Amino acid sequence: MERDTILILDFGGQYKQLIARRVRECQVYCEILPYTTALEELKSRDPKGIILTGGPSSVYDPASPTCDSALFSLGVPVLGICYGSQLMAHLLGGRVQPASVSEYGRTELTMDAADSALFTDVPESTVCWMSHTDRITALPDGFRATAHTADCPVAAMEDADRRLYATQFHPEVEHTPQGADMLRRFVRDVCGCRGDWHMASFVEEQIPVLRERVGKGRVLLALSGGVDSSVTAALLSRAVGKQLICVFVDHGLMRKNEGAQVRSIFGPEGGFDLNYVHVDAKDRFYAALQGVSEPEQKRRIIGEQFIRVFEETARSLGTVEYLAQGTIYPDVVESGAGSGGATIKSHHNVGGLPKDMGFRGIVEPLRMLFKDEVRALGTELGLPQGLLYRQPFPGPGLGVRIMGAITPDKVRIVQEADAIFQEELRHFGIDTGRGQFFAALTDMRSVGVMGDHRTYDCAVVLRAVLTSDFMTATATRLPYELLETAMNRIVNTVPGVNRVLYDLTSKPPATIELE
Ligand code: XMP
């Protein structure tokens, strides 16, 4: 059975990903395409519905992005949002003009058509999120206004016979509390999507596609132990079994036991059918990093060494036709790639994977999935929850959590201290899902006293920040007892540490990591 697809035409709106998220939350598959996509291409995808996003332009500006007006006569339901609604009005013979008052933000909304398929359960008076300076001043033929605000007579309009709908406001944002319901009505009721897009069907659908793509070729994947590469490995193993070769490079800067964990899941003892290569490159990384204390230089060395080790390992495997990557949808959308052509994810984790290794192609089976879908897929494929919901970990690993020159002893200290901190966070029931919580090692040494002895040892710093975008972050108010217990355990059981500090700084001015 063909899957139902909603296409989202992007006119430059900042919320396009959010629209896609809301549609997927209705268990309906969708894709974002540039507004320049030809009508024939849209038709060939056999969409159940099309959504036009917002955008910063004005429809009456001749240089503004537009679409073929034949889009509205395909017989496919269309929902225009913000700029998309104005474009619909403009192209179908209505009028759009600058508004005397721009509406921005939370706005009272009055519904004028209780029988609208979009607004079935919406109360007569509600709230929406507006962001516009133009407005629709004359409806196209066949349309009726279905909602208004104080300054916007056409806050929503529709031609139910042609299944064309439009909202000046943004139903996709949380500030429109009924918005998710409106989008659900559109994709499920108006477009008739079944809502059967879930990860079991994704696996079923992808396996033959991946088999066909790869044929008898072999596929190489750099497994980092993170969510995306692990789920990529699990899915490809289901599709092509031993044709998949996963290379895990242990650079010696992992969290405690992490390398062993990856081996236990993907190695010969684990439940996956694949070829697993575990490269213990610790000594090599430590040697290259010896005496280097400048943060950017450390990063560069780690990235370079990674590529070298990976290349050497790949070369020793003979001819491998494909390179697999754990690229996910936000990477694709942010890189501006939209649909089509393989973009090589600039793997900031490892400083970029080699591009000239003679692969026949790149395989990116997650490139249409959001992070939570990747996690759901991982669950479907039998990966442990601890791996799927772990905190993000920087590519250079503990290299950016150890200030100054790296030594195996400092790595041991920070691993032990971090493991204790993580245990206490779990013990106190702290939800670490929305931030970064870790121990790091300062380059400070200070005097202490242990028993009757003077010590001159290191200071560990605990960092616990909440963040949604990793661009800004605030330190959390962890329970004092937690900090105290972690401190006690660390100074008592981790040799070489005589002080534990808590980092209160937000980002900015500090960064999340120490280096
Ligand atoms: P900062 O320290 O810049 O970190 O506030 C923001 C987020 O990015 C991660 N991070 C890195 N990830 N390579 C990575 O793959 C790096 O060099 C790197 N530096 C920071 C950091 O863990 C945090 O989540």
Image: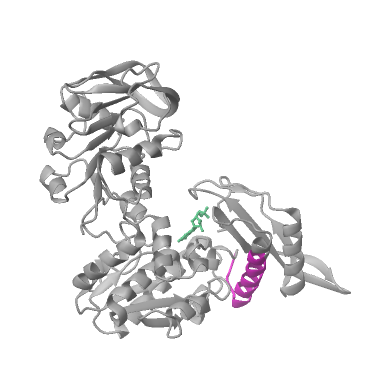
Q: Which residues are magenta?
A: 404-423
Comparing 2 with 321, the one in front is: 2
Q: Residue at x 26, y 50 (%)?
A: 338
Instruction: Inspect this view and state whether residue 224 appears.
Output: yes
Q: Position of residue 399 (x, y in %)?
A: 53, 67
Comparing 255 with 458, the one in front is: 255
Comparing 3 with 419, the one in front is: 3
User: Does 461 appear above or below 16?
Assistant: below
Q: Position of residue 241 (x, y in %)?
A: 31, 79
State the residue lying farthest toward the top.
100
Q: Residue at x 51, y 81 (%)?
A: 283
Q: Quadrant of the C terminus?
A: bottom right
The quadrant in which residue 215 appears is bottom left
Q: Position of residue 277 (x, y in %)?
A: 39, 82
- Asked whether 405 falls inside the magenta stretch, the response is yes
User: Does 164 appear above or below 463?
Assistant: above
Position of residue 304 in the picture relative to residue 257 (left or right): left
Q: Position of residue 163 (x, y in %)?
A: 21, 34
The quadrant in which residue 89 appears is top left
Instruction: Inspect this view and state whether residue 441 appears.
Output: no
State the residue lying farthest toward the right.
452
User: Does 375 appear above or below 10?
Assistant: below
Position of residue 190 in the picture relative to residue 326 (left or right): left
Is the magenta region chiefly helix, strand or loop? helix
The quadrant in which residue 141 appears is top left
